[in-house]
Amino acid sequence: MMRHLISAADLSRDDAVLILDTAEEMARVADRPIKKLPALRGRTVVNLFFEDSTRTRISFEAAEKRLSADVINFAAKGSSVSKGESLKDTAQTLEAMGVDAVVIRHGASGAPYRLATSGWIDAAVINAGDGTHQHPTQALLDAFTMRRRLVGRDAGLGKDLAGKRITIVGDILHGRVARSNVDLLHTLGAEVTLVAPPTLLPVGVETWPCEVSYDLDSTLPKSDAVMMLRVQRERMNAAFFPTEREYARRYGLDGDRMAKMPEHAIVMHPGPMVRGMEITADVADSDRCTAIEQVANGVHTRMAVLYLLLGGNEPAVAHARPEESK
Ligand code: NCD
């Protein structure tokens, strides 16, 4: 197992399956009356959030507490110091306090990588979402949800998602969820199709290991899971589609469209959902939508990641700091 989790692309098939299997073990703990494990007793984990978050922050905190770690929450929003400096200063403060892991969400793509490779800290770094780049634990919890629903809870153990057809719809350009999912799903053997207006697809998407379509209706009948993504307005600096109505009409999932999906197929959403935009309320509230299940699975998956990175199968030894960064 690696020391940091920065990108879903860094995970091998075996790493990913090990995390998913470990998450199933963690899920069994969640079914007990006392949900706590002593695995990270005496370890300190810092949640360093430079960007807004509801689900991811709470989910990491729940995962850390269930593993008995000491948890420090640091909401860095509103800091006036320039990004690079403030990250370094903050990192060195954390290092002085002796933290074992840093869970970081940052608006700048690459911030977690910088933290992990700069030599500023010895702690394990877990990326909880960086800019438009990566959100690996989201991809893992999504894969966990898909494996459970499409392969089976027990039947899925040790297995990947070979041959499953996953459609990801919406703002691929600004979202880190799509990119992370494409990387991980490809590693796990799934066939991914992205559906979005051309303006919301990144340059170079043709080099990604997936198909691209502009036509949602023709893709739905061929999907085992349809993942709806939010339009990331906070990252937009121009008009990417004419109106919200037009977007919802062409790329939103409503009841009529959902009826085109195979009966076993699920609707996924990482949250936050914008009802009436990418998903209608009846679809969001239907039994086929796994949004809430994904949140519960997020805790199991993040417990598995923390446990494995902090010594589940190897001791979390303190690494020497590279000389040049002193
Ligand atoms: C996503 C994110 O922050 O990247 N949300 C999440 O982590 N659950 C997706 C989004 O903001 O739309």
Image (cartoon, rainbow, N blue to C red):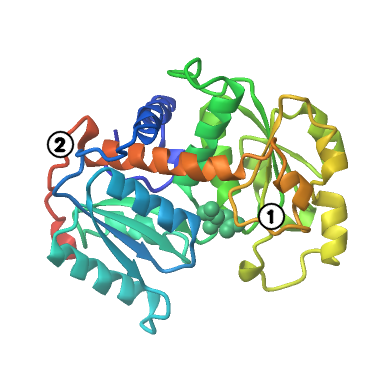
Q: Give coordinates of residue 268: x percent, y percent.
A: 64, 41
Q: Which amino acid type is marked by label 1? A: Asp
Q: Give coordinates of residue 74: x percent, y percent.
A: 32, 68
Q: Which residue reaches farthest top?
A: 155
Query: Residue 198 vs residue 52: left or right?
Result: right
93 vs 122: above or below: below
Q: Give coordinates of residue 305: x percent, y percent.
A: 34, 40
Q: Nearer the viewer, residue 234 or 256?
A: 256
Q: From the image, which quarter does the N terminus lie in? A: top left
Q: From the image, which quarter does the C terminus lie in? A: bottom left
Q: Earlier in the sequence, mark 1 or mark 2?
A: 1
Q: Give coordinates of residue 229: x percent, y percent.
A: 66, 51
Residue at the disc numbered 2:
315
The residue drawn where x is 35% and y is 54% is 61
Q: Nearer the viewer, residue 256 or 236?
A: 256
Classify mark 1: helix, strand or loop.
Answer: loop
313 vs 111: above or below: above
Q: Which residue reaches farthest front?
A: 33
Residue at the disc numbered 1:
171
Q: Which amino acid type is marked by label 2? A: Pro
Total number of numbered discs in the rendering: 2
Q: Quadrant of residue 231?
A: bottom right
